[in-house]
Amino acid sequence: MAATFSVDPHRYVGRSEPFKRPKEFASFSYDKDHKFHLNDSSIKWYYPPHPLNQPLYIDLSKGFSSFVKHDDSQDEHLDSLLKTIAHHESETKSPIDANIVTWRGMMTKIMAAPFDDDGFEMNATSYRGTIFIEENHAFKVKRNAEQNANQSRRRGPIPPEVMQFWGYKFETLCTLPRPWGETSRDYIEGREDEIVNNNEQYCSVVRTGIGKTILCLGGEVDALWDSKPRQKGAPINWVELKTSAEIRSANDQFFFNKKLMKFWIQSFLLGVPKIIVGFRTRDGFLTKIEEMETMSIPNKMKSTPNAPWDGDVCINFAAGFLEWLRQTINDDGVWRIRRLPKSYEIEVFRIEEAGHGEIITDEFMNWRIKLELGLLNPPAEDGDPGPPPPEQQDTETTMSG
């Protein structure tokens, strides 16, 4: 029998639960062939295609025929995130203290649930006091097939695959592989002709917290605004790059405000302070670039008439759901976290009585056993563990500061 948790937004109105500032403690990269590397080799630097005060009219469809697109039909599970965590633990000689480990995308779906009708399915398992959560790949494949079929039936003058390409093209137009001073003028001015390849990604791994739950989240970040600080856990001036249709009417503004919820959640969860939005025509020409401060977005929504979402409600719902989830997934096996489209509740039920499915790799479990047996972790002198590393020193706040 499934346990259920309400997503009714009216239940979570009020001052936001406290949250901990996300602090990066590790990272990894995928190269142009989507091969995993334990380094920051795929970091990009933000640099707009033209000065912000200069008129724009750039064709975002240009280069679609040569697009190198990542094949996401394979289930990658949490493998890269687990490798990165294990590497970090080999350096600190202690396990991370997270209650929940997952991708940023899963937490985005959860936080958005009170104001979003989309359904989702995730698989979860508990291992040594931590819940590991991943997307149910079979559900993802089925949903993508249904969306592609729906798009084909109402196909307009521009194929949906080209419209999906526009976002990746915008990222290519706005980023450099090295800081500006180390990049050639030819490259900077030739980005409109650069081959777009979304295999390449830099992924940040952060420790954060919502309410009483400590989270370890992994997720892609698009670019750096300036430089990355040397001290682990220090704030990083990341930039999130997004595209959206030009706002030409009150209806356009309403739908853009709805999109802003996920823009905000995605950046909020990884500690990305700035969102850059490229506004485009309906036929895919970039006409304007606008900068937004992530933490200012929820307050702007509060002052918007008929606002379609509330940031405090998103945080309060996530805090309550995560605490409930930790009480619900309290035994071995594999569990399903499911929200049907437009449903007012999330269901959690066990689908496998034992084991961890393919959510956790044998390599990671073997590593944790060695670590916890003390084979790689000599006792601290005089019984004093010392202060926690910077990424585990909490900075707690609420939406209103």
Image (cartoon, rainbow, N blue to C red):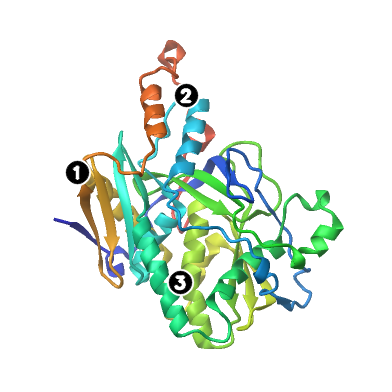
Query: Which of the numbered marks, if any, corresponds to residue 302?
Result: 3
Question: What amino acid type should be assigned to the residue bearing mark 3?
Answer: Lys
Q: In which quarter of the view is residue 287 placed?
A: bottom right
Question: What amino acid type should be assigned to the residue bearing mark 2?
Answer: Lys
The vertical placement of 163 against 139, above or below, is below
The vertical placement of 304 against 43, above or below, is below
Q: Secondary structure at mark 1?
A: loop
Q: Which residue is mark 2?
A: 93
- Of mark 3 and mark 2, the one earlier in the sequence is 2
Is 143 left or right of 326, judged from the image as shown?
right
Q: Give the Cα distance between marks 1 and 2.
A: 32 Å
Query: Which of the numbered marks, if any, corresponds to residue 58?
Result: none
Q: Position of residue 23 (x, y in %)?
A: 52, 43
Q: Is residue 303 visible?
A: no
Locate the N terminus by quadrant: bottom left
Q: Which residue is mark 1?
A: 353
